[in-house]
Amino acid sequence: MTKQPFAVETSLGVKAAQKMMIERHFRHLPVVEGGRVVGVVSDRDILLAQIAHQGLDGELAIGDVCSLNPYTVSPDTPLAEVLETMAKRHIGSALVAEGDKLVGIYTATDACRHLAQQLRTGKL
């Protein structure tokens, strides 16, 4: 899990979010409104929105393209449950929250990193 992940407000422009994701090598960004978790946006969400709105005037905001009601877990949710749900729903991230407060994000990349560590140490 990545603790205290970077999050963006719903009002942020898609282009600014995309630039941030490229520069920081993020594929998923939690989306907040007034500090409360409301969604998640992926690099794929942004790309599809840009293709769909190509040629239209005005810039989209992240709130227009993010997935609302993201898969959210508590810090003590068993990892096996998180991974099973991510696989079942075909999603690349789970937001980790305590109440409405975002405390982390667990991504498919985190899962690969964890699996590699387990394989290296022979604990799998």
Image: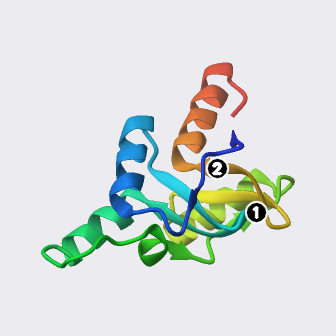
Task: State yes or no: discs 2 and 1 in contact (Cβ < 8 Å).
Answer: yes
Instruction: From the image, tell me which residue sits under label 2.
Output: 106
Q: Is residue 121 above or below residue 105?
A: above
Residue 44 position within the rendered picture, expressed as x and y whole percent measured from the top left:
35, 61
| Identity of the residue drawn at 30% across and 72% down | 49
Mark positioned earlier in the residue sequence (2 or 1): 1
Horizontal relation, residue 120 to residue 62: left or right? right
* Amino acid at dot 2: Tyr
Residue sitting nearer the eye, 6 or 2: 6
Which secondary structure lies at badge 2?
Answer: strand
Q: Where on the picture, by quarter, is residue 14? A: bottom left
* Amino acid at dot 1: Val
| Identity of the residue drawn at 49% across and 54% down | 28
Res 73 label:
1
Crowdedness near tag 2: few (<14), some (14–19) or many (≥20) residues, C-alpha within 10 Å: many
| Identity of the residue drawn at 71% across and 43% down | 4
Q: Where on the picture, by quarter, is residue 82? A: bottom right
Residue sitting nearer the eye, 81 or 46: 46
* Residue lying furthest front: 58
Give the CA distance from mark 2 to mark 1. Answer: 10 Å
| Identity of the residue drawn at 61% across and 71% down | 70
